[in-house]
Image (cartoon, grey):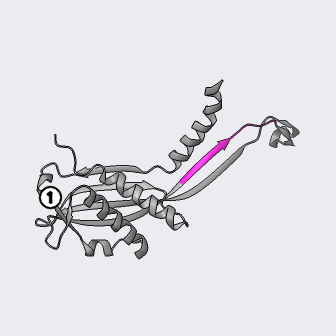
Amino acid sequence: MKPLKVLPALILLLVLTSCSSVRVATDYDREANFDNYKTFAFFKPGIDKAEINDLDKRRILRAIEAELMANGYTKSENPDMLVSIFTKSNQRVDIYNNAWGNGAWGWGGYGGWGWRSGWNNNQVTTTTEGVLYIDLIDAQKKELIWQGSGTGNLETRNVEKKEVRVKEFVSQMLMQFPPEKK
């Protein structure tokens, strides 16, 4: 009997966590020796091109700095690698087709008036998904050595929730840096 009482709570938890998930992808230069990178600085020309407001830029940069420093990297005036970001947004369209119900009386086209089994209830929702890219660049060669991208819903009007969401994006991406040695 107990598993049946817990099941609705587990389903709700699964739905809530799946809605807030960040999809992460990374790519890197297989020739780069990531052991050589100990220091970083932000690449201002690249960051200035990011098409988001300055408050969100600062949130993202603070989150990146905190993650890198927590992983043993040091911010420097003479860095081994440069950090840049850019963003874009995608329009996501979800179509929910619900063709069920008890039925109703109605006009059925060529079939005339009569009982119709079920309703056609199509729902279309659109949401804007944000994509955040973090580029790590070899400071000497000026070559991209690692790129992470995180896709998910960033939009929120609550500042505290936005801070948490940005940290989640950055943390999940940088969790895969440096790449594992093969």
Characterize the local packing of mark 1: few (<14), some (14-19) or many (20 or more) Cα atoms within 10 angstroms: some
Q: Secondary structure at mark 1?
A: loop
Image spot of residue 95 (x, y percent): 60, 48
User: Magenta region, mostly helix, strand or loop?
Assistant: strand
The answer to whether residue 32 is seen in the rendering is no
Q: Looking at numbered disc 1 in the image, what kind of residue is underneath it?
A: Tyr
Horizontal arrangement in the rendering, residue 120 relative to residue 28 (left or right): right
Q: Which residue has dot 1 on it?
A: 37
Quarter-of-image position of residue 15: top right
Instruction: Name the spot of residue 51 as percent of width and height, x first.
Output: 39, 72
Tell me the magenta residue range.
Answer: 93-102
The quadrant the N terminus occupies is top right
Measured from the top left, where is residue 87 in percent x and y?
38, 65
Quadrant of residue 96 within the rendered picture:
top right
Which quadrant holds residue 57?
bottom left
Query: Magenta stretch: residue 27 in it?
Result: no
For this rendering, which residue is in front, 85 or 2? 2
* Left or right of 60 on screen, residue 122: right
At horizontal 43% and vertical 51% (from top left) the residue drawn is 22
Measured along the vertical axis of the image, is residue 143 above or below residue 172?
below
Outermost residue on the top side: it is 1
Which of the pair 10/52 is nearer the observer?
A: 10
- Is residue 132 among the parts visible in the rendering? yes
In the rendered structure, the answer to whether residue 90 lies left or right of residue 33 reads right
Instruction: Give the residue at x 45% y 64%.
Output: 163
From the viewer's side, name the closer residue of 12 and 111.
Answer: 12
> From the image, which quarter does the C terminus lie in?
top left
Pinpoint residue 77: horizontal percent, then vertical percent.
Answer: 16, 74
